[in-house]
Amino acid sequence: MEKQTRRRGAALEEAILRAAVEELTSSGFAGLTMDRVAQRAGTNKNAIYRRWPDRLALGVAAYRQLTGAIEPPDTGSLREDALEMLRRANRYLASPLGAILRELMAAAGGASDLLAQLSERSDEPAATWLVILGRAVARGEAAPEALHPRVATVAIVLLRNEFVTRGVPSVPDDVLVEIVDEVYLPLVAQRRNHRGQ
């Protein structure tokens, strides 16, 4: 009988992350425990704690394994692109994977480094919104001064706020239209006369 080689480095990390992903998708963040991940990965908790300091950090790392790149829409209209992005994000946040993201965001609280990791690989990274806004600038729909990360992402922040503060399972489409028409587009238009940061 051949002796099993002890996993180390990248192989062990991959096994732990795979186990954490399986636990996260089957039980959500609330059911994710270091014990269950260690058991599923065939390792001990110390091996996990050497890589991730706590359950939240492991949950964020596992979530990042589940998400991929987003292709921004290109309808030829800033309004339609922004609405399409919000509609996609709304569907995503209402999905089981979105529920995991909402749990992780709530658990992260003020942990800005973990929140940044979630934003990088969630449903719509800031770069995607900057692409949409950049196309609008190129078409003459927006001024170059509008190309600012906070301006670009204000619509998605407001959508996330609906989920987090109101605890809704999905945001009605008329609210998405209101976010775009009453906040996002006026803000972009206002930046036409804005100079500096």
Image (cartoon, grey):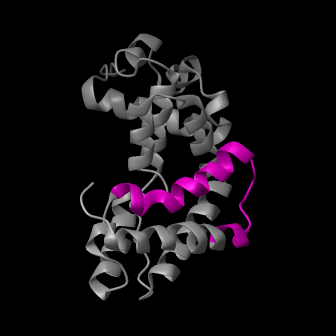
Give coordinates of residue 73: x percent, y percent. 44, 78
For this rendering, which residue is in front, 192 or 122? 192
Q: Quick check: 79 above or below 113?
A: below
Report the magenta stretch's main SS: helix
Does any portion of residue 105 appear in the rendered image? Answer: yes
Q: Is 105 within the magenta?
A: no
For this rendering, which residue is in front, 173 or 65? 173
Residue drawn at x 74%, y 47% is 166
- Indicate the quadrant containing the N terminus: top left, top right, bottom left or bottom right: top left
Farthest residue, direction top: 46
Residue drawn at x 39%, y 55% is 150
Q: Quick check: 137 above or below 52?
A: below
Residue drawn at x 61%, y 33% is 29
Q: Which region shows up in magenta?
A: 149-176
- Taking the image as shown, residue 103 lies to the left or right of residue 60, namely right
For this rendering, which residue is in front, 123 or 173? 173
